[in-house]
Amino acid sequence: MMTAKEIRDSFKSFFESKGHHIVPSAPMVIKDDPTLMFTNAGMNQFKDIILGNHPAKYKRVADSQKCLRVSGKHNDLEEVGHDTYHHTMFEMLGNWSFGDYFKEDAINWAWEYLVGVLKLNPEHLYATVFEGSPEEGLERDNEAASFWEQYLPKDHIINGNKHDNFWEMGDTGPCGPCSEIHIDLRPAEERAKVSGRDLVNHDHPQVIEIWNLVFMQFNRKADGSLDGLPAKVIDTGMGFERLCMAMQGKTSNYDTDVFQPIIKAIAAMAGTTYGKDKQADVAMRVIADHIRTIAFSITDGQLPSNAKAGYVIRRILRRAVRYGYTFLNQKHAFMYKLLPVLIDNMGDAYPELKAQQELIGKVIKEEEESFLRTLETGIRLLDKTMEDAKKAGKKEISGSDAFTLYDTFGFPLDLTELILRENGMTVNEDEFNADMQKQKERARHAAAVETGDWITLNEGETEFVGYDYTEYETSILRYRMVKQKNQTLYQIVLSKTPFYAESGGQVGDTGVIVSEFETIEVVDTKKENNLPIHIVKKLPEHMDAPMMACVDTDKRTACAANHSCTHLLDEALREVLGTHVEQKGSLVTPNSLRFDFSHFQKVTDEQIRQVEHMVNAKIRENIALTEHRNIPIEDAKELGAIALFGEKYGDEVRVIQFGSSIEFCGGTHVSSTGKIGMVKIISESSVAAGVRRIEAITGEKVEELMDTIQDTLLDIKSLFNNAPDLNNAIKKYIDENAGLKKQVEEFMKEKASQLKARLIEKATVVNGTKIIKSVIPMPADVVKDMVFQLKGEISENLLVVIGSVDGEKPLLTVMMSDDLVKSGKDAGKIVREAAKLIQGGGGGQAHFATAGGKNVDGLNAAVDKVVELAAL
Ligand code: SER
C-alpha cells in the first residue's frame, strides 16, 4: 500500500517526466488579491500568469498546494466532520499548461497517471463533460468527450451542467468547461445493485470526485459576457486526501494515514476510540481537520484575530474547541497537544511547521484558553436565558438570543440546540436565520465593490523601474473603474513605473503622473496578482499623451530609511533575544516602522536599550547597501539571507545586504545606513501569545521627539525656578506636599472634633431619638470618622445625617444606633431613596450607609428626606 508521502511524490515525478517544472506550494494566506483571503485552489498562485499580467517562465508546471476552503465562493466549513470527505484545509495536486498543451494531453496524462501508474481500476472511474449552455451560447464539450472515449465506455462519460462542469475563478476572469474524474469506491455487491453512474455528483460518500481538469479558454467580463482567452490554460486539481483514500482502500479520508495518527491521539486524550460513537466521531474528525488548518495558517503568518482572515482562523479554532468540549469532554486546552503528532506526520513535507512549533503551540494554547472562558460565560448566559423562558412559561428561546450566542460567544446553532434539547427546549430558528441574514447583508454591503472591466490602451507588460529611478517616462497600458462606498476611483497600469506598490509591509508610493496637459495625483500604489496598480481619483483627459510618472521623493526617502532600519532592528533583536526571533509582521511608513516578531516574554527596558544601541552603532558605521537583484534563490540561501515564512519566492530573488544583515526583500532602501540618521524605539507591546510588537522612529522623527522631550523638560525646569538639580527639586516638592497634606488632615480632624461637639449641642430630639444633622464641606474620610465617633459616644436612640461636599461632589452619610436598626430601620435603603435628590446612588449596611451624587444643590433637601424616611 502506498503511503500518503509516496503518493504525493509519485504525482510530482510523473508530471516531471512529462516535462513539468515542479514548484513549491504557495503560502495558504494570500496577500495581494482583494478577492481572496486564502489559497482555495492550486491555480491561485498562477493567477497573474493566467490573467496575462506576466508571461509564464515555465509553460508546464505541477505541484501540491495547501488549500483552504472556508470563506467566499468555496466554503466547506459547515460540512467538515459530518461527512468523511470534506475538509477545511486540503492538499491539491495539480498540473498546468500555460498556452502549451490542452485538452488531449491533459486527459491522456490524467488517465495514464491514475490507471497506468497508480493502477486504479478503470472500471471504477467516470468522467463528466460540460453539457453546454444555450444561454451562454456554448456547445457540449464534444472534444473532451471524444478523448475520454478512447478509455471509457460511453456510459462512464456523463454530461454535467454549468454548476458542476464550468469552472470560474471568481465573478469575473478566466474560466472554462471542465471535466471531472469520479471514482466509485463501493464494494462489488453495492456496485452490482446500483450503477456508479447514477451516484456521480449525488453526495454519495464513496462515489466522489477526485480530479478536476479545467480547460480555461474564456474570460468572464463584468457584464457577464465571455471573451476568448489569448492563451489557453490547463488547470487541474486533484484532492490529495481523497486520492489517498482510494489508493489505501479506505472508505473515509479520515481513515488514511493522513489523519489516523491525529485521530488516534485525540481518541487517546479523550479516553475513547474512533468508530464507537457517532457524535464523538464527528468531533474527532472536526478536530483532526481543524488542527491542520490552524497550525498551517499560523505557520504561514496568519494569527487568529478579530478581523478578516484572522477572524476566520479564530472561528475555525473555536469550532474545534467547542466540539471537543461538548462531545469529548475536553474542558481544558487540548488542541495544542496535538501538534507533535501533526508535525511528526507532515513536518517532512512542510518543514516550516517544525521550525515554528513553539510559536504555533503557544498561540493555539492561549486562543483555546481564552475561548474556553468565553464558552463558559456563554453557557451561563444560555442557562439564564432558559431559566427566564421557563419562568415566562415558554419552551422556546428567541432566535436573537441564539444569534448573540453565535456571534459573541462562538456558539454555532447546533450546539445551542443540543443544550436546549437536553433541557426540553427549542429555539426559534426562523428568527435566528433572519438575524444571520441581516448580518450577512450588512457585511456584503460594507464590502461591496463594483469593479469595471480593464480597458486596454496599449498591449505590453508593465515594468517596475523604481529601484533605480523615482521619475520615468511612461504610458498607460490599461485602466479600470472601481466603486466602493460611493467613492469612484480608477486603477491605472503603466508601461514603466517607478512607483513602489505596497508589499512586504512597506506602504505604496504616492506622487503624480504629469503630461504637458495635466497633472494627475496618484493617491496610492497597490499590487494585485503581482500587477502594480496606481490609484487615482480622476483619469487623465489625454490618455495617450507622453507622460512622466513621478514619485513623492520625500515620502519615499523616509520609507526607505524606515525599511532599512527594520532590517537592522531584526538583526539586533536576533542578537539580543535569540535566533527564535522571526518576523511576524511589518509596517513601514514614512513616519514610523512597526515590527512584529516571535518572542515569548516582554522585552525588558534593558534589552530595548541594547537593541537601540546596536542599531545606532550600525547606522553610524554607515554601511553601504549591497543589493543582489535577481539572484538564484539557492545563491541567496548560500549567502545566509533570512527568508520569511508565508512569503512566496520565485526561482530568482532580491537580497538586501547591509554588512551582516542579509534579507530576502523587495522593498526600497537607503544607499548606506548613515542615511537612517538614528533610531528610537517608542513602544514595546504584545500582539498575541508569543508575538511582540516594536514601534520605532528614525531620522527627523527622532529629532522631533528629542525637541519635544527637551521643551517639556525646560518647561518643568522653569516651573522649578531653573533649579540646578531638577531631580532633587522635584523630590523636595513632593516631600513638602506630602507633609502639608498630613498637616491639613490633622487640622481637619481637629476641626471635626470641634464640629462634633457643636453638632451634639445642636441635636434635636424627636420621640426620644437624638437627631444630628448638618451640611458641611469636609472630605469623605473625615466625615466617616466623625459619624463613627458620634455613634461611639451616643450608643442609643441616635440618627446622624451629614451632607458633605468633597471637592465638588455631594455626599450623603447616614449612621444609626443599633436599637433603631433592630426596630426595623435600614440606613442603606433610606440613603438610596434620599440620594435621588442629589442625582446619585449608594448604599451600605443597615446602620451605616453613604451615597454620592452629582447635584450639590439638593444636599439640604436630601438630608431632610433622610430624617423624613427614618420616620421617628
Ligand atoms: N481550479 C480547479 C479547482 O479548484 C482545478 O484546479 O477545482
Image (cartoon, rainbow, N blue to C red):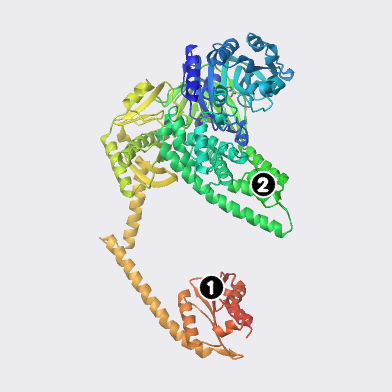
Q: Quadrant of residue 100?
A: top right
**Quadrant location, ligand no. 1:** top right
Q: Which badge, 2 or 1, is on the more N-terminal residue?
A: 2
Q: Is residue 516 visible?
A: no
Q: What's under tag 1, amino acid-wise?
A: Pro
Residue 479 as seen in the image, left or right of residue 352: right
Residue 302 as seen in the image, left or right of residue 676: right
Q: From the viewer's perspective, is the residue at label 2 or at label 1 nearer?
A: 2
Q: Position of residue 499 (x, y in %)?
A: 46, 28
Q: In this view, which residue lies farthest toward the front? A: 189
Considering the numbered disc 1 on the image, is that residue within a helix, a strand or a loop?
strand
Closer-to-camera residue (380/526) = 380
The residue identified by callout 1 is 810
Residue 223 as seen in the image, left or right of residue 787: right
Image quarter hosting the C terminus? bottom right
Residue drawn 47% across the image and 41% down it? 336
Tell whether circle 1 marks a residue whose Cβ is less than 8 angstroms from ligand 1: no
**Badge 1: how crowded within 10 Å, few (<14), some, or many (20+)?**
many
Residue drawn 53% across the image and 74% down it? 811
Give the number of callouts: 2
Is residue 848 shown above or below 515? below
Is residue 208 shown above or below 580? above
Considering the numbered disc 2 on the image, is that residue within a helix, a strand or a loop?
helix
Q: What's under tag 2, amino acid-wise?
A: Glu
The residue identified by callout 2 is 417
Q: Is residue 570 visible?
A: yes
